[in-house]
Amino acid sequence: MQDVYQIDKSRMRQSFHRAAKQYDAAAILQRQVREEMLSRLDVVKLEPEVILDAGCGTGHGLHALLGQFKKAQGIALDIAEGMLARSRTLFPWYQFWRAKPRFVCADIESLPLANASVDMVWSNLAVQWCNDLDAALQEWRRVLRPNGLLMFATLGPDTLKELRAASGADHTHVSRFIDMHDIGDALTRAGFSAPVLDVMHYTLTYDTVESLMRDLKAIGAHNATAGRAKGLSGKGFLQQLRQGYEAFRRDGKLPATYEVVFVHAWTGSQPYTAPGTSTVQFMPRKAAHPD
């Protein structure tokens, strides 16, 4: 039986390709998460030679990383060519002493990169579009060198809980998101050491459901699950959605909750041969509600 939450990668690729031009204007959460991830690097001792931005979107994460790590070379990888085209505009000529990043159109679950070829893998809100978390983590473990750093953020189960509740149960309207503890288990299976995971909650607010849906469309976050309604959603569904979402209105605004799981982990000091047995450390943080 088909998993109704299986992501249609072709539909996902097309959605992000089409969204590339207007993506930055609507990517409020992505910017906030990127800044949080960058702040966490302040306490990390690392001098990477090669950085992979896996699911780079419009390239701002890699641009910031290469500004911080002056000697590093970059690889911008995304499944959507439109996103890579926008990324290229951030590096029109780049510094004369440093080569431009490499731009690679590929799926993060199957990387066209050599074993032990990068020192740092960074990924901002892309993992939730994977069908096989283990495959993605194993690929990242494969391409990382000894003592390499993995740092990513992804969405947890509370994400868009209001939209999920208001949409009804006739079809899948919101993707399935993975719990922090399951991510920790997957990191251990993939052979990462000293993994640290914690969660922050972000709440964006809207005047109407339609404005939320427009923002999701603008960043390419269309419903790409196998269990989605295949036909056009009619006025009846939209009316149901409006009515259902009103139950969550507070102070005149409709909230959209995002549970963000932050992760960093290391490879061992030896070349990778088999999954490790390290213990996942869970470091709770007080939930945050940025404006």
Image: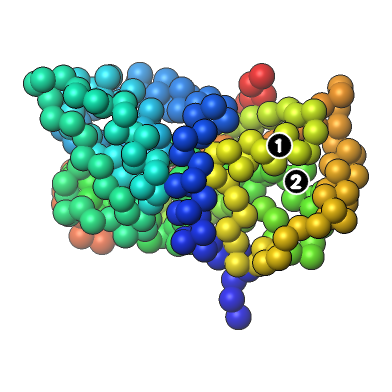
> Residue 209 sits in which quadrant?
top right
> Residue 254 sits in which quadrant?
top right
Q: What residue sits right under mark 1 in the picture? A: 212
Q: Can I make out residue 201 in this image? A: yes
Q: Residues within 10 Å of mark 2 (few under 14, many from 20)?
A: many
Mark 1 in CB contact with mark 2 (< 8 angstroms) = yes
- Give the side of residue 246 with respect to residue 55, left or right: right
Looking at the rendered structure, the kind of residue marked 1 is: Leu
Mark linked to residue 163: 2
Q: Residue 43: x and y, percent?
A: 35, 20
Task: Check the picture and name the quadrant holding the N terminus.
Answer: bottom right
Marks 1 and 2: which is nearer the front?
1
Q: Which of 253 and 195 is in front in this view?
A: 253
Which residue appears at 88% of the width and 49% of the height?
A: 239
Measured in 3D between alpha carbons, the distance from the residue under mark 1 to the one under mark 2, in whole angstroms, is 9 Å
Residue 167 vertical placement versus 86 (above, below): below
- Give the side of residue 164 with respect to residue 199, left or right: right
Q: Residue 267: x and y, percent?
A: 26, 45
- Of marks 1 and 2, which one's residue comes earlier in the chain? 2
Looking at the rendered structure, the kind of residue marked 2 is: Leu
Question: Given the current orientation, which residue lies at the most extreme bottom position?
Answer: 1
Q: Residue 184: x and y, percent?
A: 47, 49
**Secondary structure under the numbered disc 2 in the rendered image:** helix
Q: Residues within 10 Å of mark 1 (few under 14, many from 20)?
A: some
- Give the side of residue 210 with respect to residue 130, left or right: right
Q: Residue 286: x and y, percent?
A: 63, 26
Mark linked to residue 22: none
Which residue appears at 23% of the width and 46% of the height?
A: 144
Q: Which of 249 and 222 is in front in this view?
A: 222
